[in-house]
Image (cartoon, rainbow, N blue to C red):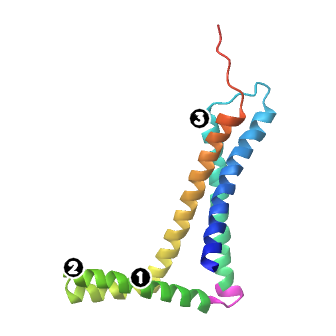
């Protein structure tokens, strides 16, 4: 149930990022006298919004992880979660490699790498990078859709 709630909260965050891109386009349109804007301009406005929002989210995640480890002394919780996740992931991968016929020495090296602190840190950085990318894509899409649906169409000149 808790995992389902977290997944729903993540989807709401992505949708809010798209709404934010459209909202910034609406603010831009309101300040302009000729209230028309191209989809490309809306995309660029969404890109800037996405860069600001996604990097703010990444910085907040980094500060939160730092605070958990060093200020609140809750690093063991993070380490235990990472260890359990890495253990489960490595077991599944090793079973696949063993059934595929990979030699035991290579499997042992891969398992040692996957259970190392460097692997955990890389996995956290990769996760944050994926979140940044998803937020950026949704903000750009929101900006483009905002320009398409909120702005008046440009009248052709005769």
Q: Helix, strand, or loop for circle 2?
A: helix
Q: Quadrant of the C terminus?
A: top right
Q: Tag 2: Cα neighbours inside 10 Å, few (<14), some, or many (≥20)?
A: few
Distance from the alpha carbon under mark 3 to that under mark 2: 48 Å
Mark 3 or mark 2, whichever is nearer to me: 2
Quarter assignment of residue 143: top right
Q: Which residues are magenta?
A: 69-75
Residue located 80% across and 26% down the image = 33
Residue 31: quarter of image: top right
The numbered dot on residue 120 is: none
Across and down, in percent, residue 97 comes to: 26, 81
Q: Residue 73: x and y, percent?
A: 68, 91
Q: Earlier in the sequence, mark 3 or mark 1?
A: 3
Residue at coordinates 59% horizontally, 35% vertically from top-left?
Answer: 40
Q: Secondary structure at mark 3?
A: helix
Which disc number belongs to residue 100?
2
Q: Are marks 3 and 1 in contact (CB under 8 Å)?
A: no
Q: Is 21 in the magenta?
A: no
Where does the image place residue 30, in percent across and percent down from the top left?
80, 35
Mark 3 Cα within 10 Å, few/some/many (few <14, many 20+)? Answer: some
Comparing labels 3 and 1, the label whose residue is closer to the camera: 1
The residue labelled by disc 1 is: 89
Whether residue 116 is visible: no
Q: Which numbered marker is on residue 40? A: 3
The crowd level at tag 1 (other Cα within 10 Å; few <14, some 14-19, many 20+) is some
């Amino acid at each position: 149930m808790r995992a389902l709630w977290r997944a729903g909260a993540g989807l709401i965050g992505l949708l809010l990022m798209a709404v934010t891109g459209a909202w910034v386009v609406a603010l831009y349109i309101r300040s302009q006298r000729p209230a028309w804007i191209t989809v490309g301009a809306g995309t660029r406005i969404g890109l800037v919004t996405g860069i600001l929002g996604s990097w703010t989210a990444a910085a907040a995640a980094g500060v939160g992880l730092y605070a958990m480890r060093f200020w609140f002394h809750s690093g063991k919780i993070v380490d235990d979660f990472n260890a359990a996740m890495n253990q489960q992931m490595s077991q599944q991968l090793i079973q696949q490699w063993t059934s595929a016929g990979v030699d035991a020495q290579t499997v042992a090296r891969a398992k040692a790498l996957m259970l190392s602190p460097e692997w955990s840190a890389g996995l956290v950085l990769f996760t944050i990078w994926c979140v940044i990318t998803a937020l950026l894509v949704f903000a750009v899409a929101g900006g483009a859709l905002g320009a398409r649906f909120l702005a008046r169409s440009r009248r052709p000149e005769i």
